[in-house]
Image (cartoon, grey):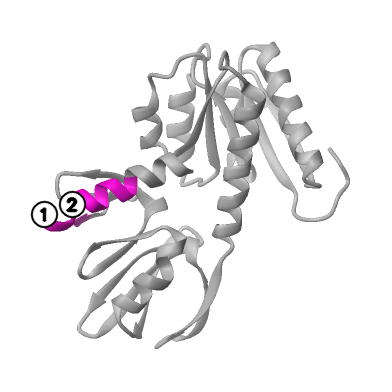
Amino acid sequence: MRKRGGHMMKIAICDDEKEFRDLIRVYIEDYLNTKDILYTIDTFISGEKFLNETFPSEYSIIFLDINMEGMDGITTAKKIRERGINSYIVFVTAYIDYSLEGYKVGAVRYLLKNGYNLQVAMEECLDAILEKKRENNARKKFPFKEGQTEVLFAQILYIESKLHKLEFHILENEKIRIYTMYGTMNELEEELELYHFVRVHQSYLVNLQYIRQVSRYKVTLYDDETISIPKARYKEVQAVFVAYKGEI
């Protein structure tokens, strides 16, 4: 760990092969040292140890080996998400046939252990995560009827247009609160497009990070709420979602 300025970044590496635990650790340290980022890295030999011996929510980034003895990386990731934890999950794997499973748990990347250059892939992965963290700090004051409130865009699940009013569904301390204001969806859509929101319906603007899946004419959010998509918009919403999953 380097004693540097800025926020502390806590990282977990969960892999039952010592060689790869050490290698991944070195690559992460090399990258973060060049960025002057303060960090700690903890390593674990199994999914069980990670879940039982820590508070997973403390970690900004969690690297999970998919093919661990005992609880595999996919199961570990599902248990992390079941606890409502939004850490960035990166899968490290010797195989690449797990991508669909990874989407279900919101994995941000797959790193191939035996890939052409694991270090370069790691740097690209961490670049993407740091960019995402910057976006996730974007905020704005909104003149809600309940009082002017500063909101992190990353905490908005979705916005619904109802009779000339906009209803903001916002995640606060693991509960969803609703705020209302007057305004038009078109103006908001233009402003929030930069922050990965998609208009799934004339009346709904949804934050892509909270969408678990897009299936026939509906989106499913992480809390299992569903919002229908008109047929005319379906292909476009699906394309935006797939592009977003490939980007992060």
Q: Secondary structure at mark 1?
A: helix
Left or right relative to 124: residue 221: left
**Residue 49 placement, left or right of 30:** left
Residue receiving disc 2: 234
Amino acid type at circle 1 is: Lys
The residue under the point 36% across, 36% down is 104
Residue sitting at 59 percent across and 35 percent down?
62
Q: Is residue 201 visible?
A: yes
Q: Position of residue 239 (x, y in %)?
A: 28, 46
Crowdedness near tag 1: few (<14), some (14–19) or many (≥20) residues, C-alpha within 10 Å: few
Which residue corresponds to the image point at 56% horizontal and 66% vertical from the top-left? 138
| In magenta segment, residue 80 | no
Question: Which segment is the magenta one?
Answer: 227-241
Residue situated in front as seen by the camera: 89 or 122: 122
Q: Secondary structure at mark 2?
A: helix
Residue 215: x, y in percent? 20, 43
Q: Which residue is mark 1?
A: 231
Where residue 105 sits, quadrant-wise, is top left
> Does residue 162 appear left or right of residue 63 in this picture?
left
The image shows residue 197 at horizontal and vertical percentages of 38, 61
Label pair 2/1, CB-CB below 8 angstroms: yes
Is residue 53 in view? Answer: no
Rendered image quadrant of residue 182: bottom left
Q: Which of 24/76 is in front? A: 24
